[in-house]
Amino acid sequence: MTTERRRAPRKKIISIEKIGRWGQLTYNHKLECGHVDVRKRAATSEEIACMWCLRAEEQAAELKKLTAPPIQSVFYDDNLAEEETRIEKTRAAIAARIGVPMEAVDVAAEDVNGVLVIRSAVVYLSARDISRLAGE
């Protein structure tokens, strides 16, 4: 315990409060850090070692070891954003040409060597769209 007290940071005593009755007296030393050190005798010095600060430092070190490493942010390629925009424009052009809502067009793209290439497109037609396109 004495070696731990030597390692503990020294803090200034703000106040000392006498607690208990005769034979069971304790002295609560309120420290500048906000901790309270309970002792059998009142300290005569202006500063005492704060064991709670020492414990807090040790626990902080333990918690730091337990935390997960930061997640690496995903590399965002500007070219990918441009390719996705191109695919959405193609989807919009198909929908406009056929005269259907954009939600009815599904474009399938594949990553080929880091470049998005359109492989196919599927257009979902309602009965009404089929009749309209067939000229009925």
Image (cartoon, rainbow, N blue to C red):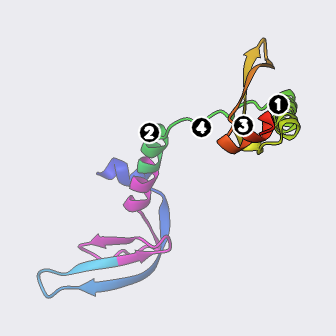
- Amino acid identity at mark 4: Pro
The magenta stretch spans residue 85: no
Q: Residues within 10 Å of mark 1 (few under 14, many from 20)?
A: some
Q: Closer to the N terminus: mark 3 or mark 2?
A: 2
**Residue contact at pointers 2 and 4, CB within 8 angstroms:** no
**Residue under circle 1?**
87
Give the alpha-carbon distance from disc 2 to disc 4, as whole Å.
12 Å
Q: Is residue 97 left or right of residue 20?
A: right
At which x and y percent is residue 27? 28, 79
Q: Nearer the viewer, residue 116 or 65?
A: 116
Q: Nearer the viewer, residue 62 or 125?
A: 125
**Residue under circle 4?**
70
Image quadrant where residue 124 sits: top right
Vertical order, 109 against 89 (above or below) = above
Q: Secondary structure at mark 3?
A: helix
What residue appears at the point 38 percent right and 59 percent down from the top-left corner? 51
Q: Which residues are magenta?
A: 29-58
**Residue contact at pointers 1 and 2, CB within 8 angstroms:** no
Give the alpha-carbon distance from disc 1 to disc 4, as whole Å.
33 Å
**Residue under circle 3?**
130
**Residue under circle 2?**
66
- Nearer the camera: disc 3 or disc 1: 3
Image quadrant where residue 109 sits: top right
Q: Is residue 87 left or right of residue 17?
A: right
Give the alpha-carbon distance from disc 4 to disc 3, as whole Å.
53 Å
Q: Closer to the N terminus: mark 4 or mark 3?
A: 4
Q: Closer to the N terminus: mark 1 or mark 4?
A: 4
Q: Residues within 10 Å of mark 2 (few under 14, many from 20)?
A: few
